[in-house]
């Protein structure tokens, strides 16, 4: 795919995408969260780890926009930094999952035969595990660190990607341009990555976006069970989890991080659906 | 058909062995010991070594695996935590989990399908857009967070117990009231568990309906003079529901994973909580068995989904 | 002069998409007389199917909309009927069959169910009688052992059989008009002929009118009484079949005819029409055919030519119809 | 349209069901029943006092089973339980003779005798039995059944904590003789001699006990005790509010809110536990006593107690709970004094020479890792505060939490840590030999590798001494030594708070059979020391 083709494709995609107002709204929120996460040190009014126990459990006020927690830390500042952690968990985990998914799917789809059967059996096996329980078990056993969580979520969620990358490859490899590339004697790696993969990327992109949403929710769930990113690092999940003990005494500790998770996950879901609608030619122009 | 069954069974067996080996590797490679969990200054370390030996923890890993398999099939697999047969522990809880999930599933299907169907009836109308947004909201809400808020709200509003299988002070209740009490304790967690599913399935139903409505045979049906209603609710719906039937099979894998958090929150004595506690306590026999059983259930679920699809779709039945 | 069964006057159907207005059918008028077969011919995308669907008001709304015109069926304007009344017309007085027999039958119902549905609806028969009638219809379209076939699902039938079942379904209520939208296109050549023959036969038996929508002039020559040639949403030539085939007065019709491979004439090369079907979103000014027209003159660019009456019952939308032979 | 109706029917059914339920739920008051519902975070594991390790099981076992003796209400001595009296004959091989109560019946009606005691002991000592209790009896030379109501224990050497170990619940020989004790169904259907007998155990939901009408001290007044398992503490509060739970362990921050609820009464009591920061003395960083003392000076324990525990904790100066007899009240906790801390550190050579805000010595910064187990909110908050407080002094603390079993196996037991926040929950006997004696460094619980020859000698002496006053002197001295060395920074000893529905009273009958109600009192031995006298009167109870 040449560069001009790419740009015009993006333009074309954007034309459809921007019609979906919910998706554009989601994208805007994601961008804002990104900017906020990136500039947290400048935006945060307080050091997120600074404790001042004399100020503990103060309700939201002009001094502390979202109140303070049980150690007098500023919840607003912690949430800003928490955005970094939650987003990194989401993105790195999905990055790993997409990487593995594409690799496995591409190899299985391109080479076919026994390689394919073997890899697809592996996919079947992985699919049979109750994912959340598996993640929980492994995180619990290896110890919950942000690194472990990202890797484990990534390692347990690549199967969907692998399956449809494989399917795309199966159909794409019979197409003329691939046959032509083969006839020209290009090596497999080049064919896979330069010729087939770009054509199979659109759906990968869609699931990746939706998977980021799932990964953020999974981290929150792990935090709830005590296996999330470990305190004192502030992820939204563990601000929420630490705060639930105080649910009667300090509602803001539970409500705000919950809303932040909800909003972020919602945005990724909306964008993901928007992408799906505008990248799937069959659905185009449906409105 | 026989060949198909045979192939499926073979595949099943292969997958099962893979699952058990994989989960065994994961568990035994982990740091931490099931015994050294108590930090009681009155317990001497010699005792702990002896206890580890009694659990075969001193044997090589591969031997432990086969011992586990052997014990599982002879019913001699005991939990590290309370010395009870693992299968018995699972058996006494699985019905609670199944009940909760069954109710959640019923709620999902009875709410999501109408929701999706009605949304797709007038796509992009105000109500449809509202439904779309609501569905995404439902998909994005952290379940335990919602559960907390709901529990808080119901306790404040009604002052009636919500946790557990039933209320504990039931003196003076008539039988129908006891039934109502059970339903109340079931409905709340099941509804919250169902929210994700309702959101997902209603989206799925909606897009499935929209897809079907564009098919040629819908036009044919209309050209016969059938009213829009009949065309929509008979010809379109039936086709749109076909792929949804298969989803029944995919509900099972989510069963245990999805139950872990909700069962803990609602003090519901089910498999999910058992699994979570077993993970915490390094109760290898229980963790392994639950992983394996849920994988088996998943496989069975997929199999049932295939069969169901064959029943529902005439195109499959005769192939 | 007989009264026409169906009289279409200035039918205009547009699709309002986000990319712009697609003027699929623009100011189309024709009539169909009792017992005749009118063929609507043109390349794909010329608006012939939309015309057919517009008559039964089966255009998806939105984005489609019948902007203006009249469709007089036995003197009643179908466009003024309510949806409820329209339901009484569809399948009962006017039926339609479609191009793809593979996808036009509902895969989850038996063909019997699908035929009986229309019978029960319009003829108010009970289930048993409806079934009897359905078997009768299947027999009539020459489906072997219809008592058995009635309980088959569409996928169990071959393409030809399916199309026969479609015809049985469409004709089960003895409609006065059948709109057949490319009924044979998806079929093998030998089966095409059989189905066409069947259609013709039944049409004669039932004294029914047929509006045959096709791109295949071979089909037209076999069964048509009169022909309307469409291009870019307009009727460009309209007349009895002999006139169209032998005295065509429009360069597009000529192009179409020349592109049919004819066995008896030894031609080394087919005379295809140069250029492409215009983008429906962006139709040329003036005569819509002029960019591809060998006879175009400056005036063609300026304004759309009206339908000229070449002779009685034969019309052409070409400024230079006299030169076109 | 049939299908459309069907589609509408199910959601409607759901809504109607919900509606009926809401009406039902909002219209029902909670009846008053003569029973006690206790919430517990975890399920019990073994209803068998020999096998049980967790507190849920122990709580229930203490109601179903009796030991030979039990602590008195001040935790300062013993009173008879299954034994009416006992005799200790001191000497190099001391003997304890228990004279058992006659006429005690097991819940199944069979009589209790000394054979049961011997059986219980034998089971504990059996290597196949998965029990951690065995270490309590390792110094027992032999046991004898003198007659059916006399039981004698002979020790290999003087061992004063040994007496307390006979508080363990006694098992019925006739039911367990032929069973594999580890997997026996007895562990889920216990039969004991205690005031309550076992009725039902629904895993992860509840354990039900009922009054034992033949209890040797008389039938308890309560009809029933139910243990409910509610894994989320913050939610079991909801059940307390809806009266689905009668007794609940209150977290410090909930205290004020709870005390404002009209139908609850709140009790508090110092616990037998303390929380500390342990320094790994193998780490050169902590080998200097001045450094350890400086760290204690630098850690603001008052603040921790005040803000993390909301005042529900006591500062302690040494390794014992402050309300018991062996705590040395003359030793005062080191005061919070950052200046003093700085001075001590400077003396030990720690100064910020490079001006980066972190102290250093010989080019090495003062940096260490403070770890604790995850899941304990208080330790987590303490860690965060300590990290901050020490940073102000120029000490760089990295604070991390690990899951319990990983924490123990990879860090604590492997001695692979710098400093840790942990707590000890102790028995009322002061013998903490396993924690502090230098012989316990390799495989015991002295994982900080603390060595003090004088203290070692005293620990050995203390467990040989039977006289309370002499023991007190020994432990007071140990207390001084450890406070001086500061191998731990003793943070606090928490005060336990519990909430109880106000409907419970103590019912007492005087000799004439007249019944009087008294309010329930907190004892040093716990709120439930007099549980068999608890009662729920039908009518309302007047508050004093």
Image (spheres, rainbow, N blue to C red):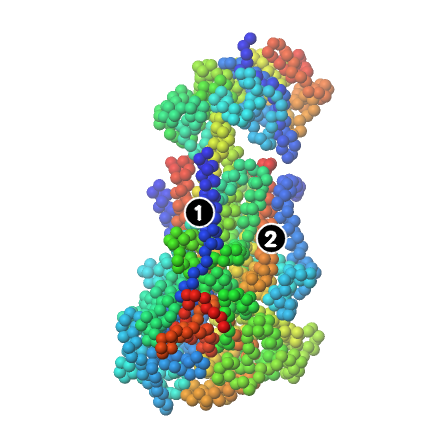
Confirm whether circles 2 and 1 share one chain: no
User: The residue tagged with tag 1: helix, strand or loop?
Assistant: helix
Q: Which mark is residue A264?
A: 2
Report x, y in % for residue D391.
64, 73
Mark closer to the observer (2, 1): 1
Check if mark 2's residue and mark 1's residue have beta carbons within 8 Å. Answer: no
Viewer-proximal residue among A66 and D265 = D265
Which numbered marker is on residue B106? 1
Visible in this render: residue C28? no
In-image side of B314 versus A167 (left or right):
left
Which quadrant, please, contains the N terminus of chain C? top right
Element on which disc 2 rests: helix
Q: Residue D462: image x %, image y %?
A: 45, 87
In the picture, measured across the screen, residue B126 lies left or right of residue A126, that is right
Which residue is nearer to you in this view: D100 or D528?
A: D528
Q: Residue furthest bottom?
A: D91
Residue A155 position (above or below residue C19): below
Image position of C113 with respect to D505: above or below: above
Q: Position of residue B58 (x, y in %)?
A: 39, 69
Asked where in the image residue B24 lies, by quadrant, the reply is bottom left
Q: Chain of mark 1?
A: B
Q: Is residue D245 left or right of residue A265?
A: left
| CA gap, disc 2 and disc 1 | 29 Å
Residue B162 pos. (x, y %):
47, 57
Relative to D366, residue C89 above or below: above
């Amino acid at each position: 795919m040449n560069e001009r083709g790419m740009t015009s494709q993006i333009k074309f995609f954007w034309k459809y995408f921007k019609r979906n107002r919910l998706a554009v709204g989601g994208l805007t929120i994601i961008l804002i969260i990104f900017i906020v996460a990136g500039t947290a040190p400048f935006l945060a009014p307080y050091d997120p780890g600074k404790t001042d126990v004399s100020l503990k459990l103060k309700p939201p006020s002009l001094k502390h926009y979202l109140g303070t927690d049980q150690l007098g830390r500023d919840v607003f500042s912690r949430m800003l930094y928490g955005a970094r952690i939650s987003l990194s968990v989401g993105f790195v985990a999905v990055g790993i999952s997409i990487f593995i998914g594409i690799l496995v799917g591409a190899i299985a789809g391109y080479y076919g035969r026994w390689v394919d059967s073997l890899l697809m059996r592996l996919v079947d096996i992985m699919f049979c595990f109750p994912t959340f329980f598996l993640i929980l078990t492994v995180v619990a056993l290896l110890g919950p660190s942000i690194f472990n969580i990202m890797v484990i979520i990534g390692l347990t969620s690549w199967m969907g990607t692998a399956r449809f990358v494989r399917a795309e490859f199966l159909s794409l490899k019979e197409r003329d341009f691939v046959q032509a590339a083969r006839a020209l004697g290009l090596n497999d790696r080049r064919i896979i990555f330069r010729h087939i993969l770009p054509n199979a990327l659109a759906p990968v992109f869609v699931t990746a976006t939706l998977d980021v949403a799932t990964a953020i929710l999974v981290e929150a769930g792990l935090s709830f069970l005590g296996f999330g990113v470990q305190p004192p690092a502030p992820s939204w999940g563990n601000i929420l989890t630490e705060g639930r003990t105080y649910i009667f005494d300090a509602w803001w500790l539970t409500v705000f991080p919950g809303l932040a998770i909800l909003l972020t996950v919602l945005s990724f879901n909306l964008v993901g659906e928007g992408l799906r609608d505008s990248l799937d030619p069959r659905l185009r122009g449906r409105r | 058909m026989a060949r198909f069954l045979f192939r499926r069974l073979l595949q099943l067996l292969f997958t099962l062995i893979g699952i058990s080996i994989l989960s065994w590797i994961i568990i035994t490679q982990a740091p931490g010991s099931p015994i050294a969990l108590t930090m009681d200054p009155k317990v001497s370390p010699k005792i702990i070594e002896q206890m580890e030996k009694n659990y075969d923890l001193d044997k090589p890993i591969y031997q432990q695996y086969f011992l586990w398999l052997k014990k599982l099939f002879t019913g001699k697999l005991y939990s590290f935590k309370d010395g009870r047969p693992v299968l018995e522990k699972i058996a006494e809880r699985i019905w609670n989990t199944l009940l909760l999930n069954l109710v959640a599933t019923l709620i999902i299907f009875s709410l999501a399908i109408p929701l999706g169907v009605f949304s797709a009836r007038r796509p992009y109308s105000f109500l449809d857009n509202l439904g779309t947004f609501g569905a995404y909201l439902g998909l994005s809400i952290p379940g335990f967070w919602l559960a907390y808020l709901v529990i808080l709200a119901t306790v404040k509003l009604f002052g009636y117990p919500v946790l557990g299988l039933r209320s504990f002070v039931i003196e003076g209740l008539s039988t129908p009231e006891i039934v109502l009490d059970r339903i109340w304790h079931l409905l709340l967690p099941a509804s919250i568990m169902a929210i994700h599913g309702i959101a997902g399935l209603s989206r799925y139903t909606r897009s499935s309906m929209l897809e079907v409505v564009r098919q040629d045979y819908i036009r044919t049906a209309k050209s016969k003079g059938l009213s829009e209603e009949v065309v929509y609710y008979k010809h379109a719906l039936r086709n749109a529901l076909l792929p949804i039937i298969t989803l029944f099979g995919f509900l099972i894998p989510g069963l245990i994973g999805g139950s872990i958090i909700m069962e803990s929150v609602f003090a519901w004595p089910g498999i999910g909580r058992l699994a979570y506690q077993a993970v915490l306590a390094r109760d290898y026999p229980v963790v392994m068995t639950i992983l394996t059983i849920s994988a088996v259930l998943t496989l069975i679920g997929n199999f049932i989904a295939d069969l169901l699809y064959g029943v529902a779709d005439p195109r499959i039945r005769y192939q | 002069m007989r009264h026409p069964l169906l009289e279409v006057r200035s039918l205009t159907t547009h699709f309002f998409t986000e990319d712009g207005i697609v003027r699929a059918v623009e100011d189309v008028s024709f009539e169909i007389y009792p017992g005749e077969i009118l063929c609507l011919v043109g390349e794909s995308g010329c608006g012939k199917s939309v015309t057919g669907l517009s008559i039964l008001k089966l255009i998806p709304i939105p984005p489609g909309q019948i902007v203006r015109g009249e469709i007089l069926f036995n003197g009643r304007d179908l466009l003024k009927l309510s949806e409820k009344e329209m339901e009484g017309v569809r399948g009962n007085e006017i039926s339609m069959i479609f191009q793809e027999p593979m996808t036009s039958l509902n895969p989850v119902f038996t063909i019997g169910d699908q035929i009986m549905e229309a019978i029960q609806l319009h003829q108010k028969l009970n289930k048993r009688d409806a079934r009897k009638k359905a078997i009768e219809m299947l027999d009539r379209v020459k489906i072997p052992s219809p008592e058995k076939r009635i309980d088959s699902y569409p996928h169990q039938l071959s393409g030809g059989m399916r199309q026969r079942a479609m015809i049985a379904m469409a004709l089960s209520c003895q409609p006065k008009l059948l709109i057949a939208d490319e009924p044979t296109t998806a079929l093998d050549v030998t089966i095409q002929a059989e189905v066409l023959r069947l259609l013709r036969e039944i049409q004669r038996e039932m004294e029914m009118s047929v509006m045959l929508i096709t791109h295949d002039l071979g089909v037209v020559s076999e069964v048509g009484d009169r022909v309307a040639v469409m291009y870019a949403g307009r009727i460009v030539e309209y007349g009895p079949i002999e006139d169209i085939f032998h005295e065509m007065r429009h360069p597009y019709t000529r192009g179409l005819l020349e592109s049919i491979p004819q066995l008896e004439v030894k031609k080394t090369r087919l005379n295809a029409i140069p250029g492409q079907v215009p983008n429906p979103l962006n139709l040329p000014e003036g005569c819509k055919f002029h960019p591809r027209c060998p006879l175009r003159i400056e005036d063609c660019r300026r304004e759309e030519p009206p339908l000229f009456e070449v002779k009685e019952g034969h019309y052409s939308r070409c400024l230079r119809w006299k030169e076109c032979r | 349209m049939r299908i459309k109706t069907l589609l509408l029917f199910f959601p409607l059914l759901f809504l109607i069901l919900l509606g009926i339920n809401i009406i039902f739920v909002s219209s029902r008051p909670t009846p008053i029943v003569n029973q006690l519902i206790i919430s517990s975070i975890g399920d019990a594991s073994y209803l068998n006092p020999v096998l049980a390790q967790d507190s849920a099981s122990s709580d229930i076992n203490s109601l179903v089973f009796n030991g030979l003796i039990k602590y008195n209400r001040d935790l300062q001595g013993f009173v008879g339980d299954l034994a009416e009296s006992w005799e200790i004959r001191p000497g190099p091989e001391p003997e304890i003779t228990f004279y058992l109560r006659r006429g005690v019946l097991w819940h199944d009606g069979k009589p209790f005798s000394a054979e049961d005691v011997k059986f219980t002991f034998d089971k504990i000592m059996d290597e196949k039995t998965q029990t951690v209790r065995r270490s309590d009896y390792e110094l027992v030379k032999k046991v004898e059944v003198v007659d059916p109501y006399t039981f004698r224990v002979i020790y290999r050497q003087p061992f004063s904590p040994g007496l307390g170990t006979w508080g363990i619940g006694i098992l019925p020989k006739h039911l367990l003789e032929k069973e594999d004790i580890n997997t026996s169904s007895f562990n889920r259907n216990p039969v004991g001699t205690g005031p309550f007998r076992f009725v039902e155990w629904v895993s992860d939901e509840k354990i039900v006990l009922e009054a034992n009408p033949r209890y040797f001290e008389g039938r308890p007044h309560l009809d029933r005790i139910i243990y409910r398992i509610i894994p989320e503490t913050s939610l079991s509060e909801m059940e307390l509010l809806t009266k689905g739970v009668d007794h609940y362990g209150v977290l410090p921050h909930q205290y004020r809110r709870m005390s404002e609820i009209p139908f609850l009464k709140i009790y508090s009591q110092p616990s037998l536990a303390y929380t500390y920061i342990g320094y790994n003395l193998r780490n050169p960083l902590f080998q200097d006593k001045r450094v350890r003392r400086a760290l204690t000076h630098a850690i603001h324990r008052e603040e921790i107690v005040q803000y993390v525990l909301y005042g529900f904790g006591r500062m302690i100066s040494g390794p014992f709970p402050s309300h018991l007899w062996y705590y040395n009240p003359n030793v005062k906790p080191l005061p919070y004094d950052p200046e003093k801390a700085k001075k001590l550190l400077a003396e030990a050579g720690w100064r910020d020479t490079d001006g980066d805000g972190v102290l250093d010595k010989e080019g090495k910064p003062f940096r260490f890792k403070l770890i604790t187990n995850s899941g304990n909110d208080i330790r987590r908050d303490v860690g965060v505060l300590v990290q901050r407080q020490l940073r102000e002094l120029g000490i760089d603390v990295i604070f991390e939490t690990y899951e319990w079993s990983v924490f123990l196996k990879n860090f604590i037991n492997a001695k692979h840590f710098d400093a840790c926040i942990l707590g000890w929950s102790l028995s009322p006997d002061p013998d903490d030999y396993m924690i502090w004696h230098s012989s316990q460094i390799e495989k015991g619980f002295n994982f900080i590798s603390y060595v003090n020859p004088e203290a070692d000698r005293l620990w050995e002496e203390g467990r040989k001494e039977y006289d309370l006053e002499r023991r007190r002197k020994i432990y007071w001295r140990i207390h001084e030594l450890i406070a001086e060395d500061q191998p731990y920074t003793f943070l606090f000893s928490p005060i336990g708070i519990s909430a109880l529905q106000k409907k419970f009273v103590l019912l007492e009958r005087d000799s004439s059979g007249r019944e009087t109600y008294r309010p329930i009192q907190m004892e040093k031995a716990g709120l439930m020391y007099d549980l068999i006298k608890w009662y729920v009167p039908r009518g309302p109870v007047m508050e004093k």
